[in-house]
Amino acid sequence: MIGAGRRIDARGRAVVVTGASSGLGREAALHLERAGFRVFAGVRDRAAADDLAAATTAGRLTPLRLDVTRADQIRGAVDEVARQVGAGGLWGLVNNAGISLPGPLECLPPEQLRRQLDTNVVGQVAVIQGFLPLLRTGRGRIVNVTSGLGRVALPYLGAYAAAQFAKEAVSDSLRRELRPFGIAVSVVQPGAIQTPIWDKVADAGTETMAQAAGRAGDLYAEPFGRFLARLAAQARRSGTTPADFARAVARALTAARPRTRYPVGGDVRLGSLAARLLPDTLLDRNFAPLVRARPDRRPLTGEPRPAPGDQGPAAGEPRPASLAPTSSED
């Protein structure tokens, strides 16, 4: 029997990474190629495909057109990978693609909530369903990327946290359902990491508030603007890097006995511990400074977005625990 500390040789094994256009997905795809894997990197447009092709160092990375919300592209990706890997099947599927749509739930349009869940949950399951026959042939493994928000739900990230909680549950169910077939399922949980997602999150939040009707938008504008600035500032200060995330993904794919969860960053470990040990009332009190409107600040509606980091906690307010969603999105 292979020892618990042993690693599986990556050479000749094929893996698919979704959401590899930028950020953590791109870093993971390139890292896995350097580690010896044959990588099929899911991207949504030609420019990202060309960028990845130019960055490849060993000629083992193939860009793959894959929007996880489109059934035709999922079928096309599965067919292309099946054609290239042949009888050897697929060793790994890294489900990294996703989006983050922030905003107070009162202000978030239902179609945005559907888009959040369709991309991060339904799309992920559809990709898994498509590739499972190849994974079964290869007796491979699935790595689902969530975040610390799969354990603790923050204000103003309710839709995103709902998707992350769902992905954690899907991963647990899959792990138990696929055990008879020898397919391992692990979750990688990155915390705050500086990647291009932060501009996308801020832009999405600004758009949500611009569309918010009447008094609801005015009520939330100031604390939500401060919240977005805090998110960006925390990511900039983070000591966790995209390379740390990529190494965790590689460990999940090469460990002889993969763990069920791989937290990446001290903020994720702290948040998970707090969720297990602290009562809800104490967690609510910890997050209260994030949602408290300041009487000396007028609403941000119509104002330019605050510079990240300019709006820290008021004097005497506690600093909330980690704010950041995963930065893995495509």
Image (spheres, helix red, strand yellow):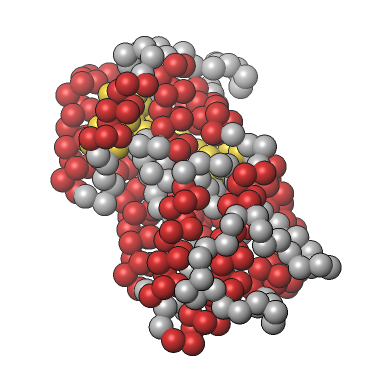
Instruction: Please tell me which residue lies in front, 89 or 45.
Output: 45
Res 289 → quadrant? bottom right
Q: Position of residue 140 (x, y in %)?
A: 38, 28
Relative to 223, 279 lies left or right:
right
Q: Position of residue 312 (x, y in %)?
A: 71, 61
Res 206 → quadrant? bottom left
For the point 46% across and 43% down, the residue is: 196
Instruction: Please tell me which residue lies in front, 127 or 242.
Output: 242
For the point 61% across and 72% down, the residue is: 223
Q: Quadrant of the N terminus?
A: top right
Rendered view: 153 above or below 11? below
Res 177 → quadrant? top left
Rendered view: 26 above or below 31? below
Instruction: Please tell me which residue lies in front, 155 or 37.
Output: 155
Residue 176 seen in the figure: no
Q: Position of residue 230 (x, y in %)?
A: 63, 58
- State the count of labels: 0
